[in-house]
Image (cartoon, helix red, strand yellow):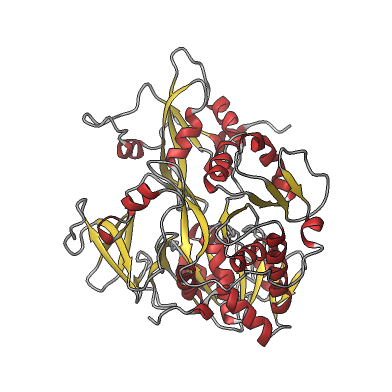
């Protein structure tokens, strides 16, 4: 693997594309908006100029809470040229979770669309560091906040497409952004991603696509999946079609209308597309290739039904990049997540970091051959960073095995994180939210199988003595306080939680094995049975 040079990094790549192919279509939105490479470059410069006028300087942290939109990437690259660090927030955050991540960022400026201002208003008087809120998409009726609120016009109208004094190109060791990932034994952690690591993420896509491809993009910009597909499009000089969120009902219409040839998608989304009734024109579409992880068991049927040429797969984390990939579009089998990429070293180890025998299951640990191609630690969490990086290797917390042919297999999560509808969820945070109810004594959250192939959230709850709290009441209370993707589907009241004798830790393996029973309350079933109003 060659050393990563500054000219490989996204801001510099976009500038080069704007100079070489200024009128080529870069960004398209399903609502009809478009931007050429020159226009996108100029907008990023305007955002850099406008943010600089607000006082953002090198080393500052700036919060963004933006849906998949042109503005999300204008803000990201504008901050990158300033040497500031974007800290992205999941657009599902609200209440306690939103307050925690905003406070942890220690930022003075935040960028949000109008639709999320009410959530910010609920916690604004509890925020000590935040001073200015930039509204990314309009100048409508803005709420009264104990913060400075700047509408889009006031923010951008006087901004010019020029970098302010002091702005410079980012370097491979500079932090490209901070992305929040799920916690397991503590709160969620902000992963600091150097630009060199971001570059290696995008390589997985550019390796199976080309400049004539049209990428279909619905992954959120607060996840690595959203950022890497944007990066790959610019790297290739290709075109990207943007939809705010995945929609199975619009998927094939978008692909056909806009000529999309490649998509990065998740296994449960593929299953949703397969669940739709077959139609005579299923194969009449331009989609040629996909990136997908995890792979659904009916992937071959998907290829045949829709005449997709092939799929590449991979395994990775925000912290480590993508150390395992398939050989282009050649999948060793549907269970494997690929083979080791050049530039990475891995081991499968026991609890003392000693390698396990070939074929046995152990924890995957990773390190890189080249500097700055893995995470630079967790934001303001030195102890957690040191724990993850012990003995010179990053510990993933994931159980793996390898076969004699060099294929690697994800087995399970040692951590207590869950994954639902493409979102990583911290069991600690679910338990904290449930435990905040005055009638809850304690709670334990575990993953149970979903019909879509990932996890559903189940929570075991011990009520306070004398409480008559019902499952429906608890679920309704949580609906007002938790992101939709995090809310438990299953709730079961128990007298006590099983614990180990020595450490008194909850035996979550025992709870997972117990799973859903006839005594378990199912939110989706309850909602389906509710009479129409």
- How many numbered discs, if any? 0
Front in this rendered view, residue 51 or 153: 51
Front in this rendered view, residue 101 or 358: 101
20 left or right, relative to 434? right
**Which quadrant holds residue 286?**
bottom right
In the figure, 433 relative to 89: above or below? above
Please state the horizontal and vertical placement of residue 308, each as a whole percent of the image: 54, 75
Residue at x-position 52% and y-position 20%: 469
Task: Work out which quarter of the rendered image holds the C terminus and state it.
Answer: top right
Q: Is residue 203 visible?
A: yes
Front in this rendered view, residue 85 or 242: 85
Farthest top residue?
Answer: 466
Please state the horizontal and vertical placement of residue 355, each as a whole percent of the image: 19, 60
Task: Work out which quarter of the rendered image holds the N terminus and state it.
Answer: bottom left
Residue at x-position 70% and y-position 64%: 47
Please state the horizontal and vertical placement of residue 442, each as a whole percent of the image: 42, 26
415 left or right, relative to 50? left
Farthest front residue?
Answer: 165
Please state the horizontal and vertical placement of residue 430, each as a whole percent of the image: 48, 37
Q: Is residue 262 visible?
A: no
Residue at x-position 51% and y-position 33%: 433
In the figure, 319 relative to 238: above or below? above
Residue at x-position 46% and y-position 71%: 196
**Which quadrant holds residue 524?**
top right
């Amino acid at each position: 693997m060659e050393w990563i040079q500054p000219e490989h990094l996204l801001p510099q790549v976009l500038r080069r594309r704007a100079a070489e192919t200024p009128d080529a279509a870069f960004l398209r939105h399903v609502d009809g908006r478009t931007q050429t490479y020159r226009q996108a470059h100029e907008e990023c410069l305007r955002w850099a100029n406008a943010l600089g006028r607000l006082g953002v300087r090198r080393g500052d942290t700036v919060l963004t809470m933006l849906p998949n939109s042109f503005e999300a990437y204008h803000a990201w690259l504008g901050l990158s040229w300033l040497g500031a660090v974007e800290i992205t927030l999941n657009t599902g955050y609200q209440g306690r979770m939103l307050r925690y991540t905003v406070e942890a960022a220690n930022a003075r400026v935040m960028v949000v669309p109008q639709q999320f201002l009410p959530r910010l208003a609920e916690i604004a008087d509890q925020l000590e560091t935040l001073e200015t809120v930039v509204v990314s998409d309009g100048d409508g009726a803005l709420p009264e906040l104990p913060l400075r609120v700047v509408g889009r016009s006031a923010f951008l109208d006087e901004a010019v497409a020029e970098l302010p004094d002091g702005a410079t190109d980012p370097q491979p060791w500079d932090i490209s952004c901070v992305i929040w990932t799920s916690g397991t034994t503590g709160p969620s952690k902000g992963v600091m991603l150097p630009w060199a690591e971001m570059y290696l993420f995008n390589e997985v896509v550019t390796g199976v696509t080309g400049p004539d491809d049209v990428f279909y993009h619905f992954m959120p910009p607060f996840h690595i999946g959203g950022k890497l597909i944007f990066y790959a499009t610019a790297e290739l000089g290709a075109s990207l079609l943007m939809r705010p969120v995945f929609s199975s009902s619009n998927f094939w219409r978008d692909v056909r209308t806009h000529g999309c040839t490649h998509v990065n998608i998740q296994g449960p989304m593929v299953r949703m597309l397969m669940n739709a009734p077959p139609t005579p024109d299923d194969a009449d579409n331009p989609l040629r290739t996909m990136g997908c992880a995890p792979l659904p068991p009916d992937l071959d049927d998907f290829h045949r039904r829709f005449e997709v040429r092939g799929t590449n797969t991979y395994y990775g984390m925000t912290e480590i990049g993508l150390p395992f990939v398939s050989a282009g579009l050649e999948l060793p089998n549907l269970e494997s997540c690929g083979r080791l990429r050049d530039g990475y070293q891995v081991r499968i180890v026991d609890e003392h970091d000693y390698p396990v025998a070939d074929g046995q299951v152990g924890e995957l640990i990773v390190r890189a051959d080249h500097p700055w191609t893995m995470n630079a630690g967790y934001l303001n969490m030195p102890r957690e960073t040191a724990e993850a990086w012990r003995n010179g290797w990053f510990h993933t917390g994931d159980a793996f095995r390898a076969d004699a042919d060099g294929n690697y297999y994800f087995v399970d999560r040692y951590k207590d994180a869950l994954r639902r509808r493409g979102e990583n969820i911290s069991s600690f945070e679910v338990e904290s939210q449930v435990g905040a109810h005055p009638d809850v004594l304690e709670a334990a959250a575990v993953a149970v199988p979903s019909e879509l192939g990932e996890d559903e959230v189940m929570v075991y709850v011990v009520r306070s003595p004398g409480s008559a709290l019902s499952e429906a009441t608890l679920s309704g209370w949580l609906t007002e306080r938790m992101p939709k993707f995090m809310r438990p589907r299953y709730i079961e009241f128990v007298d006590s939680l099983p614990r180990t004798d020595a450490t008194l830790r909850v035996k979550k393996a025992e709870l997972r094995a117990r799973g859903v029973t006839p005594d378990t309350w199912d939110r989706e079933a309850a909602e389906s049975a509710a009479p129409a109003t």
